[in-house]
Image (cartoon, rainbow, N blue to C red):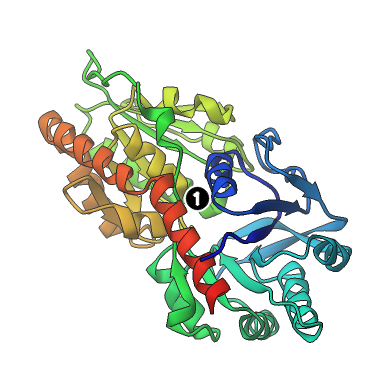
Amino acid sequence: MPRCSVALLVNFVPPYRVALLRALEREVRRLTVLVSTEMEADRPWQARSGGLDVRRIRSITLPYRRGHPDGFSEDLTVHLSWDLLPRLACLAPDVMISSEFGLRSLQAGLYRRLAALAGRRTRLLIWATVSEQTERGRGPLRSALRRLIAFMADGAVTNGTSGARYLETIGFPSGRIFAIHQSTDLDRFENLPEPKPDPAGTLRLVSVGSLIPRKGLRPFLVRLKAWCAAHPERKLHWRLVGDGGERESLESADLPANLELELIGNRPYEAIPDLLVDRDLFVFPTLADEWGLVVNEAMAAGLPVLASRLSQAAEEMVREGENGWLFDPLDPAATDAALARALDAPPQERASMAADARRTAARFSHGNTLRRMIGAIDAVWGR
C-alpha cells in the first residue's frame, strides 16, 4: 500500500505511547497528533511529545462522575473540541485514527463524509479502548451515539477479544475490527538485575496505579488481611505505587502484625522498573480495566502476576499457573483461593514463572503492535 498521511486524535499523549508513535511516524508519510489537552489533571505524568508533531485543538474540559453496575464510581473528564473540522480540512489526512466515542470521533466522521462529497478519499479508524466490563451500564443515548459513529467509521482498533465482542454489539462487523494489544517499551526493562529473595523471608508484593475504587485495592486488602490472620507465621509487604482518593483509608487501615503496607505515592514514569525489581509478585485486583498496561510492565520486569479477570491484559496475557494466577475480585472465595495459590508457590516455582512472564511480555512488544497498526491503516486505506 502507498504510504499515507495519518492524523491521530486523542485526549493527550501518555508517556507509554511516545515510543510506539515515533515508530509509527517512521512508517507513514506524515503523522500529526491532535490533542485536547497537554495532560489531564488526574494523571501523574509530565507532558512530553518526544519530538512528535503534536498540536492542541481548542476544547472545553468538563468533569463528570460515572457509576458502574458493580458498585463503584469514578471521576472522569470529557473534552469537547470545537475547531477540529477546520484543523482536519487544513491537514487533509488520508487516514484519521480517533480515540473513544465522543464529539471528537463524531466530528471526524462528519469530516470523512464532507471530504467524500468533495471528491476526496479519507478513512476513519476508531481507537476503542474498551472491554465488555468497562462498558457495562452505559445508557441508551451513549449507545445510540456509538452506533452512529460505528456507521460513519471504516473500522475500529481495540485492545483484545473482549473489546472486539463489545464493538460487534454496537454495529462494527467483525471484519472491520482490528485487535491490537497495548504494549510497553521493553527496552526500559532490559538491564534490570535479577531479584533476590528477602533474607527475612518476607514475601514482597507490589501494585502500580491510581488509588481509586475501580482498582479494587480496598476489597483486596480485606482478603489479604484474612490470609495473614490465617497464616501468622508468614510475613507480607505490599508496596502501592500511585495516589488517589483512597490513600487516606488505606493508610489508616487496621493491619495484622505480619502485613506491612507501603504507600509511596506517584513516581515518575521512568522510575517504575526500579520499583518492581525488588519484588516477588505483582498484584492487579482491578474491578474494570480496558487493558492494564502495568501487567505488561510487571511481566517485562520478570514478576509473576496475580490479576483480576476483569482486565483485558489479564485475559490476554496471564496463563494460570504458568506466569501468574487469575481471580474474580467480586468473588471473595475465588480471591482467597487465588491468593493461596500465589502466596504458597515455592520460590523455584515463582522463578520459573518469572522467566515465562518475560517471554510473554516480549510477545506484546511495540514491534508487534506497530505491525498490526500498519495492517489496520493499510486495510481501511486500501478498501
Q: Residue at x 58, y 59 (%)?
A: 3
Tell me the element at label 1: helix
Give the x, y percent position of residue 291: 46, 56
Q: Which residue is mark 1?
A: 215
Residue sitting at the far front: 2
Amino acid type for the residue under numbered disc 1? Lys
Left or right of residue 135, residue 335 in this image? left
Q: Is residue 221 visible?
A: no
Left or right of residue 248, residue 65 in this image? right
Q: Residue at x 22, y 42 (%)?
A: 342
Q: Residue at x 49, y 59 (%)?
A: 373
Q: Quadrant of the C terminus?
A: bottom right
Please tell me which residue lies in front, 94 or 2.
Answer: 2
Q: Is residue 213 above or below residue 277?
A: below
Q: Is residue 139 above or below residue 70?
A: below
Left or right of residue 217, residue 225 in this image? left
Q: Residue at x 22, y 45 (%)?
A: 323
Residue sitting at the far top: 199
Q: Is residue 282 above or below residue 319?
A: above
Please tell me which residue lies in front, 26 or 144.
Answer: 26
- The crowding category of the residue bearing disc 1, from other C-alpha atoms within 10 Å (few below 14, some 14 to 19, many at least 20), is many
Give the x, y percent position of residue 195: 27, 21
